[in-house]
Amino acid sequence: MELTSIAIDDEPHALSDIGDLLSLTPGVNLRATFNNVNDAITHLQEYGPVDIVFCDISMPVTDGIEGAKMLKVYCDHLVYSTAHRNYGEEAFHEGASGYLVKPIIHERLIEQIEQLKEIQEKSRREEYSEKKFAFVRGKTKHSFIRVFYQDIVYFEALLNHIKIITTENTEITYVGLKQLERDLMRHPDFIRIGKSHMISINYLKKVEGYMAFMTNGECLSIGEKYRHAFTEILRKGMLSGS
């Protein structure tokens, strides 16, 4: 599972530093950076929420503490990154999920991301424990298809449509790629393995090198960008001592 994020800081070098660190941190994607809270909120309103907002505290106009209530509407976790240690009590009073002191130590950032991933995975398992199926748009304007999560083997994104391969057949949907990807990525059973493929871990038979063999006999390539996160998922399911 990869978490999405944005970063807010009025100091350009601080934004550059956290951007560099996040690019080296597995399991998180930095969607955009901003030098003030208001521009960040405008972006979140237009493009949708993220999992994590990394935010400086001491900033002109609207500081990180003042902006907390607005930011938390559009994220699951607000993590402060600041050069000051004395804002901790205020930060956690506003519901912060983390507090990183500048200069940010990469190992501490990795620990923070891993903690938040565990929280997100638990939350999503609970969220989908009751949700058995979804409706996706069919081939015509007013048609919809019911797809059970437990039946999806994988899906493949093509130029203008998506193929959903199930245990029984193949469904075609013209729903937006980003929307379907976002919905499936929130489900704990699905993992992205390439630019065009997301698979259900329940139907993964074996992995050899960078190829994923599915129980329906198909073999899918694991893209270089997704190999680390995919390997981490496999390790969690390995027997102790493996």
Image (cartoon, grey):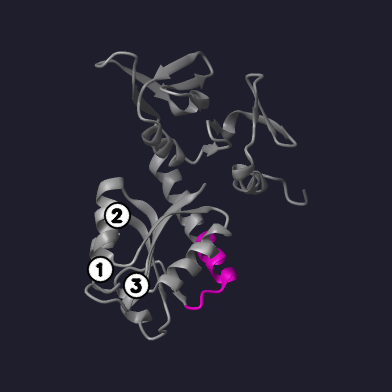
Residue 164 vertical placement versus 51 (above, below): above
Dot 3 falls on a residue whose secondary structure is loop
Name the residue: 40% across, 30% down: 132
**Label 2 vs label 1: CA separation?**
12 Å
Name the residue: 38% across, 86% down: 86
Dot 2 falls on a residue whose secondary structure is helix
Name the chief secondary structure element in magenta.
Answer: helix
Q: Are marks 2 and 1 in contact (CB under 8 Å)?
A: no
* Residue type at the position of mark 1: Gly
Residue 242 vertical placement versus 88 (above, below): above
Q: Position of residue 32 (x, y in %)?
A: 39, 55
Q: Are marks 3 and 2 in contact (CB under 8 Å)?
A: no
Q: Position of residue 194 (x, y in %)?
A: 57, 35
* Residue type at the position of mark 3: Asp
**Label 3 vs label 2: CA separation?**
20 Å
Which residues are the magenta region? 102-114
Name the residue: 54% across, 53% down: 27
Q: What residue would you read off at disc 3?
A: 10
| Number of residue marks | 3
Q: What residue would you read off at disc 1?
A: 67
The earlier-in-sequence mark between 1 and 3 is 3
Q: What residue would you read off at disc 2?
A: 74
Dot 1 falls on a residue whose secondary structure is loop
